[in-house]
Amino acid sequence: QLFAQTFLFSINEGLMALFFLLVGLELKRGFLDGGLSNSSQIALPAFAALGGMVVPALIYLLINQDNGIALRGWSTPVATDIAFALGVLSLFGRRVPTGLKLFLLALAIFDDIGAILIFAIFYSHGISYFFLALSFILVLVLYLLNVLFVRSMFLYLLLGACLWLALLYSGIHPTIGGVLLAFAIPADGVKVVSPAQKLEKILHPYVAYFIMPLFALANAGFNLSELTIQILQAKVVLGIVFGLFIGKQMGVFGFSWALIMLKRAKLPKNTSWFAFYGVTLLCGIGFTMSLFLGTLSFQNVGALYLSEVRIGVIIGSALSGLVGALVLTRAFRVKQNRSREG
């Protein structure tokens, strides 16, 4: 049991900090020169992401309102696993309009920001003000190095490791350190490739092919004997499934529709409402991010709740991916037929 706890700690608090370092680097790139480089590209995905977090959380809370322990898992269905969502969307190749793909990417950025805020606010415990102050000083030093145009990757990573330790002992979830470090690493390239771009390129294969599969293997597995009628009827499972499959599409599509109807944003170019709805369904693929939030919510409660989280996340994500793919198949087929007729 001690080995299992150490193994999970190394993954969930250690390796996932590298995952969030990569997320932070991608966020930074998006704000500097990507899909969020000007205000006109921000409104729709930002508002859609807000809806995609608020509505699933409310649905989960409504279903589990009579169970104080189960209420801890409210954040589980609010996250979108962008890697899986984009993976499903990429199956349609060139049929996917560029604007629709950019919308999903930008929404994922704001979704990640929301998840990071949830970690910082709701998963902090037993705050140590000494280590919190030390963390603050380390962050200031990191950003001072950036201002002084220091480009030593080793120095940034060394201070980043110190920041991770300080946050761990401060009571704040240490994975936040990955994001803070990412925003301190210089992104304005002095030569051809900036330090941030270089590190992002180095990290990407390790995160995609090692860290995330290892995280999923350690946190997503459950014994098939646990898959009973009783557990499928558990309110935690129902809250997560309905939150991901129903809440995500309602929040993302509903908030987007309202903003477009108010003429504060426009539907992505060359995109139909039906195809747009298909993408909102894909936002219900929570998988790794939802598993991470669910594991944090119930890590000290009991194995039963963790099993319910895993089952709920897998069912909700699978439904969202499958139905989303079917809707997109139909939407692109209709568009293709109309093009031929035209």
Image: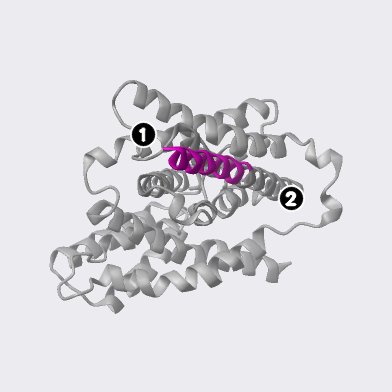
Name above or below for residue 106 compared with residue 49: below
Given the current orientation, which residue lies at the most extreme front position? 341
Image position, residue 62 (x, y; %): 63, 25
Q: Residue at x 46, y 60 (%)?
A: 169
- Residue type indicated by callout 1: Leu
Residue in front for this viewpoint, 317 or 215 = 317
**Callout 2: SS:** helix
Q: Please identify the quarter of the rendering in which residue 50 is found.
A: top left
Q: How is the image coloured?
A: one colour
Image position, residue 93 (x, y; %): 47, 56
Q: Quadrant of the N terminus?
A: bottom right
Is residue 31 left or right of 248 when viewed as pictured?
left
Is residue 246 left or right of 232 when viewed as pictured?
left
Magenta part, dominant SS: helix
The disc label shown at residue 267, or none: 1
Q: Residue at x 43, y 69 (%)?
A: 204
Q: Residues within 10 Å of mark 2 (few under 14, many from 20)?
A: many
- Residue type indicated by callout 2: Ser
Dot 1 or dot 2: first in sequence order is 1
Q: Residue at x 33, y 40 (%)?
A: 269
Q: Residue at x 57, y 45 (%)?
A: 329
Q: Residues within 10 Å of mark 1 (few under 14, many from 20)?
A: some
Q: Which residue is mark 2?
A: 307
